[in-house]
Amino acid sequence: MDTEREVLARLKPSPEDEKRIKDTVELLTKKIMATKAAQGKDIELYLVGSVAKGTHLKDPDADLFLLFKPEVSREELEKTGLAIGREAITGREHYAEHPYIKGEFMGLRVDIVPAYKIIDSSQKMTAVDRTPFHTEFVKKNLKPELRDDVRLLKAFMKGIGTYGADAKTMGFSGYLCELLVIRCGGFRACLEAAGSWRRGLRLELGPDTERKFDSPLTFIDPVDPARNVSSAVSEDNMAVFIAASRSYLACPKLEFFFPKPIKILGIGEIRKRVAQIGEMLVLTAPLPDLIDDILHPQLRKFGRNVCLHMESAGFRVVESSSHVSGQSLVIIIMLESARLPDAMLHRGPPAYVAENSASFLDKWRSSPEAVSGLFVRDACWHVFVKRRFVEAAEALRQGLENIDAGKDLNALKPKVTVHEKAPAGAEIRKALSVHLDRLMPWERV
């Protein structure tokens, strides 16, 4: 318990913090309603999220919803909502299911989100319309004495790297943390429950529903039974949370909440560690001006498709990862070997299929690409043929144009550099150090 008291002492907002946040939100509310874009509009301003629920940590985000009547067109909602946001705060447009403004006001991070004011979640017209119902559900069902337990769970999730339902993290949202504490009855109770979780677990707070979700973890939204609150949680992040929960209960320590940073390795140490595993290719490109929710899914897709290309060329991929480091995109591909033999075994048709066998024999008997005679193995014709590429880097450079990197990153491919050795630049070394870090966050020394 001493550990948890220390965490709350560091992260729970003080009365002065609470007053500053409250005053800032009130000033922003007045400024929003006084904007030219809001004049003459029937809009209700509604504070949602952790600040509204009293579950926020120090330095929180404030989420302000601009609620429009359902009869307002979607086009007008977006146009007016964005205009109000741009006029009220310094920020930029982001896109979820529809656009909103993310920025800053008097040192407070703020999201200004246009949405429809609906009577119940079955009326949902946009993906965010249910959010006010989330706020009301938590305010009604979370006991005041459990607010600090939510803070502890959020801080724990942040420390182990699993907090956030965004496309970059693929983890646990703040709302999901609140629901877990409501359901389990506290921070430690939640960790105790997580110790026995398995893939495919289904949790509910409301009445049982028949809706099925193909996710590692399912938590039915109590205000919208058609939605899985934990749909963003990746299987790896679910497993990390389970492992961290068991480890913390066995030995509570502050490192679960405040992990030590990853040590940035020198280039010599990086190359030494790489040599112990295999061989490496590193792709780098300049960071494009894309929001995280667009960038990270495409970057992961690019990395997956690079791996598929290398496998199809005969190279065995051991592992891979993708990173945003400073102003660079970095994709790291670890291979068993970066060079293959000059020839490869090519399998043909079954020897007893006359027509196909004749075609295969005619093609390869006189081909300059064949480096052996034709022979039967496992009842099929075989021949050793020259590889098109024996060097991994060359196979990747030649195939890069045809690898799908996603809608926006495809335009970036002419600027991609393929490195056969780990580059020595600081940004790339940081990404390589993250890739090579083999410790759980709470175990770093």
Image (cartoon, rainbow, N blue to C red):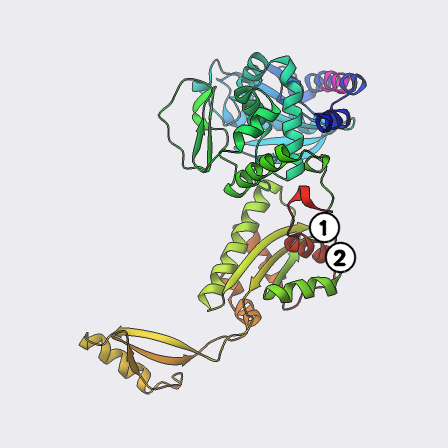
Residue projecting furthest to the right: 16
Q: Secondary structure at mark 1?
A: loop
Residue 276 occupies quadrant: bottom right
Relative to residue 256, is residue 119 drawn left or right?
left
Q: Amino acid at mark 1?
A: Gly
**Residue at x 46%, y 69% (from the top left corner):** 314
Q: Residues within 10 Å of mark 1 (few under 14, many from 20)?
A: few
- Can you tell which mark lies on residue 436? none
Q: Position of residue 72 (x, y in %)?
A: 51, 20
Q: Position of residue 258 (x, y in %)?
A: 72, 37
Residue receiving disc 2? 426
- Residues at discs 1 and 2 in contact (Cβ within 8 Å): yes
Q: 291 or 313: nearer the eye?
A: 313
Considering only vertical position in the picture, is 158 above or below 135? below
Q: Amino acid at mark 2?
A: Ala
Instruction: Please tell me which of labels 1 and 2 falls first in the chain.
Output: 1
Q: Secondary structure at mark 2?
A: helix
Residue 379 occupies quadrant: bottom left
Q: 245 or 329: nearer the eye?
A: 245
Which range is magenta? 21-28
Relative to residue 421, is residue 393 drawn left or right?
left
Marks 1 and 2, Cα distance to the nearest angstrom?
9 Å
Considering only vertical position in the picture, is 28 above or below 333? above
Considering only vertical position in the picture, is 234 above or below 82? below
Relative to residue 155, is residue 13 drawn left or right?
right
Q: Position of residue 435 (x, y in %)?
A: 64, 54
Residue receiving disc 1? 326
